[in-house]
Image: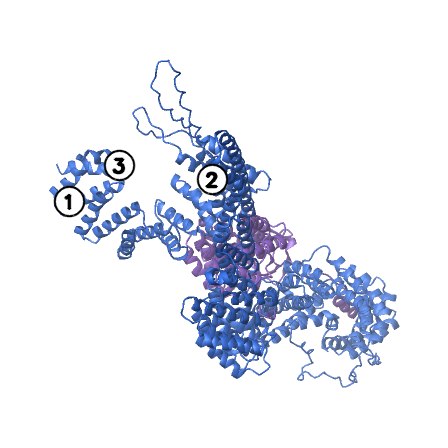
Chain colours: A purple, B blue
Amino acid sequence: MNRIALILLTVFGFTGIASAQRLYLSTGGTVDWSDVTLSGSNILVRGKSTPASNVIRVDWPYPDELNEALDLVLKQKYDQALTKASAVREIHKNWKDKPGSWYVPSSLLVAECYIRKNNLAESDKILTELRTMPGLTSAFQTGIGMMEALESFQKDMTGPAIKKAEGLVKSTEDSATLGRLHLLIGDIKFKRGDYLEAVDAYLQVPVFYGSQGALMPIAELGAARSLMHIGRLQDASKSFGLIIDRYKGTPEAVAAQKYKADVDKALTGGVPVATEKAEKPKEEAK
Amino acid sequence: MKTRSLLPLRLCIPFGLLAFLALSPAQTPPKKEEPKKDEPKEVKKDEKPAQPAEPGKGPVIPPVDLSSPGELATQSDIDFAKGDWLNAAAKYNGLVQIGIKTGMDAKALEPLYFVIGVCMYNLPNYDEAYKRFTEYTQKFPTGPNVHQVNLAIARIFRAQKKWPEAVKQYKPLINVPSVKEEALIELADSHKENQEKDKAIIVLETALAAGMKTASDVRAALYLVDLYQEDKPEKGVALLEKIKTTPGSRAVISEINFAALKLADGLMQADKPDQALAAFQNLRKQKEVVDTLKILDADYTRGIAALAPLTAPRMPNASANLQQMDRMKFFQAQAKAMIASLEKEKNYDAVLFYRMGRCFAALERFWEARLAFKYVLDNFPTFEDIPAVHYALTFCYYSLAPQNPDEDNLGISKEAQRLCREYLTKYKDKSESSQVAEMLVTLASRTKNPEQINQVYEEVMDLIKDSPNRTVFLAQQVQNYLGQYDFDKARDAADKFLAAAPPDDPMREAVEYMRGLTWFFKNDYKGAMEQLKGYIAKYPAGAYIHDAKYRLAFLVKGEQMAKKAKKMEGVPSFMLVIRACEDIIQNHANTDSVANAYALIGDSYKEMTGAELEKEKLTVEQVDINAANAYVDAVKQAKSDSVAEYSLTQAAPLLKAQGRWEEVRLIYENFRKAWPDHRITLTAVGEICKAIVRTSDSVNAKELAEAEKAKLTANDVEKVKLDAKIKELNEGRQKAKEEAQAKSREYLASTIMDNINNPQKEGVEELMQQLAITAIPKPKPRPAAVPAPAPATPGATTVAATPAAPPKRPDPPSVAEQGKAAEAELDRLLAAGGKLTTIGQARLVYVKSQLYKYLESRAPRKKDAKGKYVEDTSPKRSDELMKQVLTEFKVDDYSSAMLAAIGDKYMKDGDLEGAANCFNRLLLLFPKSLFLDWAAVGLGDIAMAAKEPDYATALKKYTLATDEYPGSKYGEAVMGKARVQYATDKLEEAEKALKDVIGDKSYPLESKAEATYLRAEIRAKQKAMGDAYMDFQKLYLSFKKFPNWACKGYLRAGEIKEALGKFEDAKKVYSEAINDPKNAEKFKGLPDFDKIKANYQKLG
């Protein structure tokens, strides 16, 4: 009887919540990340050392630091972004090619920071390593391609940059990647003076990748600036106004305020712009 | 049912439903998974199989044989694992009975009480389950499974729709970590079902107040979004914004799409497109959702595989792991179902983005809407709403097309027309086809290109053959042909209409009238009379009766003109025309024929013969007055600028001749107010100013004339008195003139003030310049001549009388004196009101600088003691003011004209950065400016001035100036292009351009010199040395005025001779440059001159 009771106890008697960050070892066991200390290429679990290469898989939710790093990149704070992304990269380098690892995404962010800082020697090292990593998913390969396009763009080689970037559009369906890719294409087109194409590239974000909230103000600002360059000043003024309203407190809203003031001043001497309406057919568009 | 945990109950709550519905707007939720047919339940030979249970009212637990406890324990676990809940419960119940009989510790029995409840719940027999779970809580109030038991009791209440009890039961559980995830949403749902939506909202808002991190937080948030839908959709939108940034949102990607779409649709229906847009902007494309779900599916498979060994009975945390594994299995099943459903949906993205496009269009964000519609149109040809998408895309392009086709540098109008045609070809039967046809006609009409318009009408007629709106277009076509003076086609189109349209067609009268007009326009007097009279007879109250009467009057006037010219028999009577016109004025007020009638009256008076004047007892003066009055009335009543302009130009000379300056001012002012953007508006301002000044002409005019007349017969004493009076009258007149001039300046200033702060308004600087010049004080008149000395008194030594010395002309006022006064006047008129923005202020300073430049250029040049002109190097006020413009104002304070002029100044001063700032701003922000060629040429020059010239940019800019913005800088742009072409070895193109410059007299001489030089260099490059030599020689023969070019000519001509081996000839050329003293003087210091000398020396 006791045996039966015991069995039942083990089945139903314990409740607990599994750890969010867990390492799976080749020995069959698992360890919570909270119990782990990194020591060189080993992991220390409650004083016991195991080679980190024994980790065969990790359960690790998307690291907040990567979100923060991306946000900092978008705010052009590359040094801070580099610190955040490098910290994640440092941890995950111990199981860089194992399922669940965040090594590649963090490395891509680190590479982007270096490219933006024009430290191409460092970014090249990272990209070279990533290119030779086996079994990279197509999303990661797209990420590498984006970095290559960005590198060309930074070097003012807009021809190769646009060729590379446009070639990547069909390689993924991931909103986060495509949103950033279209932003990059917009930047390149803008730099080349192809403003109408830049408008279309930037507007891909609010139309198709609106789920990428952090990219929205940047893309909309890019589109509004491009509209300004193609002489659609009233449309540009309206777009700047929308950015100011919707993205209050962001650097883009501040920039939009300046641009709008400039456009309005040029249009009317500062008097708010009245939007011209097109002659409409009898019924509204469906 | 094989499920072991309580989790499947979640299928019953709306959230689960919501998750399934999220698959697609048009899909039905997937069916619950049925037990597989090939897995029949195993029935023990000694057991009765469990009966299918009615929900909540299952069979009671049957008794079992208690003789073999070991066997019972083993078998119960097996039954439980198989999901044979009734038999498992019976066996566990047997174990409990054995335990009680044997006096086993109550604690040891705790798991058995729990598991029996679980079995009955899963069966389900809610009454029995409730009984068992309640028993558990009484026996083990702090037992290890008490929270699971309490959750199960709460769920039983929900299943039995006992909402108040469920709420009460759930409440404490939302603070228990192990069950709070499930309890939270289920409590909110129970509140909702209990008609306590507000409480449901509070529960979820409170729980999420700390932020969202996990997928379960996102699930709770999505439930909250659903609760917000009806009353607080804006909160739902805000919450979706937060969900976007939550890492755990990936796991519920499909549910987010569903929730966002539902919320957005609701907001669109509530006419809140701005909020709807924010909701729409959470949507992700189908492929991304499916891909993510597949990744999740793979993750779940891996997770389940990893957890499976950890759920073995003796493993630590086995219960928790089991619970987690069950959750994973549930979500995996959900993900698989969603993938299956999504993959069946062919037009999922089309639905999403068509709606999103409509939302953008509702916000008049046509740039964005266009992308959404285009995406759907290009990628979903089978989408059922594709005609509507096509229409919407067409409408976007139509809305984005500029009103003025000349401004359509992006070809948007062309694309809009293409889409219209495609729509009309594919969907002519759709109700929107007439609107699309209307768009196409409007777009074509904007081009003002008759051929294009006609072509479009023909197309439309063909495309909308069966449309009910066809007659409207036919009628428009008639009008269009009339407008193009193509009267035969107009008549044909009218005939087509009359044949096709029903008798009661509302356009019939209009078409009949227009058809009648074709005779009028073809100058078929008889036919026109017949048609017009016919119309008047048929439609006595017709819409065009006034116009018909006016045209008849016009024809009558033609008849009288013919009689006057003796081309027709009879005595002309223009009074007939006047009477006909008066009838129109009297009976058809407020129609556009009234102004026409007045103008025709004016014309008729002007044509009256002497005989008719006599007959009508009119004087010539009276006729002029009557004509002028008629034209003035025509200007006042005009409804079109052409009638107004015609009448104005007729009235003005008559009024001026009659000295009616006040009326001159009024008609011009009327015109300016009615047609502010008319091309003669600036002329009107000038005329108004002139008229204001001339109103002073009448001051004392009569009195002066009388005094002058009286002087003719007056004696000396009276003459002296009359002279004094005349002087006084003249002074009064002068004073009145000065006052009128001041008034004129004030008028001009008020006109300037209307636009001075608007940088886009061009011509303001010119008006200001005009004002500045009128503000310059007039030079003082020469004083009266000093009378000759009186004759010598008799006896005195006679001294030869010398004539009176001419009075010395006072020194002309200095630049400073004139400028200061004018500046003060400008300040008084323009700046004193304090209404100038920085733009107005910059303009004022700029115009002052221009004023001084003008005064400085007119100031007498100083001479030295030898009478030679001396260069004035004193500091100039114009420079000082220009410096002020540059330093005290920013580039964004400059108007378009100023940007052009100041950019040019920067260029001349070598400040390329300053110049580029001005020119870029001009191009960027003043796309309609008349000065764009200045910017384009300036930027081209800047590109060429770089250390390494950027030929591509330069050519682009110069081409912009020649092709897009031809203006006063056209010549410079052509020269710029030629320079680039020469530098890039496009010699033939360059030569062609240069030939035009050299042959065109309108180019400045210096440009021709440069063109000649470039052509010579081209020829040298082409090895046509003879021709090259001729051109270089031409430089020093024909362009001596320009030492730079002449010197260059000598140098290159000599070098050509050297290249040909004709060294003596070369020496001669160099010698002429060096030894001619005039040349030597002019060329001194020029680098090319030094080269000539060096070459000469080299040749010995």
Which badge, 3 or 1, comes first in the chain's sequence? 1
Amino acid identity at mark 3: Leu
Look at mark 3 in the image and give the residue it sits on. B1086
Where residue B719 sits in the image (x, y, percent)?
49, 32
Closer mark to the observer between disc 3 and disc 2: 2
Where residue B142 sits in the image (x, y, percent)?
84, 61
Task: State the CA–CA distance, disc 3 to disc 1.
Answer: 21 Å
Say which element carries label 1: helix
Q: Are marks 1 and 2 on the same chain?
A: yes
Amino acid identity at mark 1: Glu
Any mark on residue B426, and which? none
Look at mark 2 in the image and give the residue it sits on. B773
Say which element carries label 3: loop
Where residue B432 sits in the image (x, y, percent)?
57, 75
Look at mark 1 in the image and give the residue it sits on. B1058
Which badge, 1 or 2, comes first in the chain's sequence? 2
Closer mark to the observer between disc 1 and disc 2: 2
